[in-house]
Amino acid sequence: MSVKSLEELARKLNISRRTISRVLKNDKNVAEETRGRILKHLDKEKYFPNIHAASLASKKINVIGLIFPRDTFINTDFFAIDTIKGVARAGDENNYQLMIFTQSKFDGDQCIQMYKSKLVGGLILVAISKDDTEKLEELRKHEVPVALLFAYSDRADSFGCDNRKGGYIATKHLIDTGRKRIAFIHGHENWFDAEERFKGYKQALADCGLPFRPDYVERGYFRYEDAAIATRKLLSLDSPPDGIFAANDRMAIGAIKAVKDAGKRVPEDVAVIGFDNIPICELFDPPITTVDQPVVDISYEAASGLLNSINSPHKKFFTRLFDPKLIIRKSA
Amino acid sequence: MSVKSLEELARKLNISRRTISRVLKNDKNVAEETRGRILKHLDKEKYFPNIHAASLASKKINVIGLIFPRDTFINTDFFAIDTIKGVARAGDENNYQLMIFTQSKFDGDQCIQMYKSKLVGGLILVAISKDDTEKLEELRKHEVPVALLFAYSDRADSFGCDNRKGGYIATKHLIDTGRKRIAFIHGHENWFDAEERFKGYKQALADCGLPFRPDYVERGYFRYEDAAIATRKLLSLDSPPDGIFAANDRMAIGAIKAVKDAGKRVPEDVAVIGFDNIPICELFDPPITTVDQPVVDISYEAASGLLNSINSPHKKFFTRLFDPKLIIRKSA
DNA sequence: TTGTACGCGTTATCAA
DNA sequence: TTGATAACGCGTACAA
């Protein structure tokens, strides 16, 4: 018992489309008697408004897109779900649907295409690299509403974790627990987050009067194998570190493995702290001390921000940083 | 330099909309000279067809929906990304976009709503429980094209891993490596997968002439804490098991922890095998032997199957099972 | 080979 | 309070 259009309903009830539309939209300008009659029919007739017709006529789009470039998946897969949760929640609350796109690498033209063809009303770009950030200019020209998630630029509203602070508190924790020779395992070049964590690391060292030693910095490219290699290198130094801050948890795991393999103990001989608080941290042996990013919250705010800028476009962009949280477990 | 409709383009070129539409659709019935002229303009004018107008006119929808009930996220989060990858790939290949919905619990009405309102052309339902499977009848009545992913019913095409075989090879591996007293840590009631894995477990025992002992079966509800409790219980038996097959990796981790905490070694004293091959397995200490489901492939096929049934609806449904693979690491 | 004109199912303006 | 009617932008049967 379902009816395919307002028109059909209207004919059945001998009432104009417009009036039915009014009751559907809760418009008050309808006689109670008429409203009742329509509602009763609506109950048993099951009418589903055609979204395309509505969008076409109203020029409104209740869909936002979430873009995951696949080449960054290596770093984002573990929080993709939390991201989706946060964005979906904001969407639900505002009656927006969520469309997900995974691109092999960030593709600005495709983004413009999706917007211009009215597929989406705006886009959330997840963890695009510094290079990709340049391409935002193009999107801006086309007035595509955009929110950056875990990426930063002055060409779009940006949402992320205060990674510098995170790097600071991680390093500070190592210092506070008595470590004097603290190494840093760096992530990718051109990656905002690792860069900021590195700055926090250096700042903490400086604030506490510890020297910054370039030989205590190795690249691990966010991968645990590379972090293990980096760690072996660090351990073979004349004066090996007694604390390691890895720019993400995956690398912390690699570091811990390397330390163990070298016959040393974590945290007694070398303390290791990570970043991200991925699920494995809690289950690992030893449980990994790390820095937590409130991914769901950040994503929720990014989506809310996007919806906001869809409804009231602005030219002046902002960056919103969320506080990271130290999670102390056993590895440091 | 962008033009908002075919109409506008047509006026600029003094050519009818219909002809432009023809070159856009690669229709051959266009004079080469005309085609060239149009293409040249298209280059600089940047025209993006309005998707809603197209859908409205053609009655075709190039969007499929992927539904994740949140109450099952505890078991699905780790493969959600792989699922999205597989589905997105199938979509890309067929020019379909992907829309994602996370429902707090499976909501058939909302599914019907999305289909009837033309938001999506079909749906992939991920890991809905046996109970929810009942609600499919309603979707069928409304002729919603549906593919079940990691769930099974004779009311819709179903795609998943051959969990019984998986349970069989996991148990068989324990037996083959000399274990005689093999326990099973069960998942949730009403969960297809755990049930099937359990059947495989029993089958393997039977085939190898080992007795099935009800006291060797404990529920772990897919959670690692509960699995740890279950394991403690198992270890306190008069004749404790020397091998444990946990219905998922999360529980395998709990089991391993409990075994270690009891002062025993894995795998020497108790071998532990899991299921799913989640990322942590490889990184865990010891690395966890488990059974891998080809999640991306299964998802890809589910999506392809859905697209297929959108284009040629069928009343007779099928179930397609994919082969699991034993991944031997150190825990068993 | 090209073009006309109607239909798709809404929204929204304006008049009754 | 209600109802014609014109958009919205594209697809397509049919005609030229």
Image: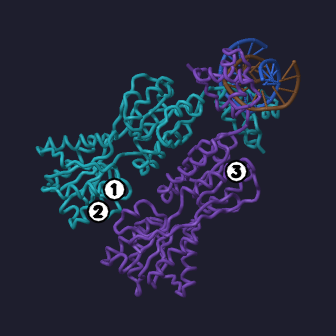
Chain colours: A cyan, B purple, C blue, D brown
Label placed on residue A257? 2
Q: Nearer the viewer, residue A23 or A2?
A: A2
Q: Secondary structure at mark 2?
A: helix
In the rendered structure, are the residues bearing label 1 and label 2 in contact, judged by CB atoms less than 8 Å apart? Answer: yes
Q: CA distance from mark 1 to mark 3?
A: 41 Å
Whether residue A254 is situated above or below residue B10 in the rendered picture: below
Q: Nearer the viewer, residue B38 or A292?
A: B38
Residue A44 visible (yes or no): yes
* Same subunit: marks 1 and 3: no
Q: Earlier in the sequence, mark 1 or mark 2?
A: 1
Q: CA distance from mark 1 to mark 2?
A: 9 Å
Q: What amino acid does circle 2 point to?
A: Lys
- For label 3, the residue is B308
Q: Residues within 10 Å of mark 2 (few under 14, many from 20)?
A: many
Residue B228 visible (yes or no): no
Residue at 71% in and 53% down = B138
Q: What amino acid does circle 3 point to?
A: Asn
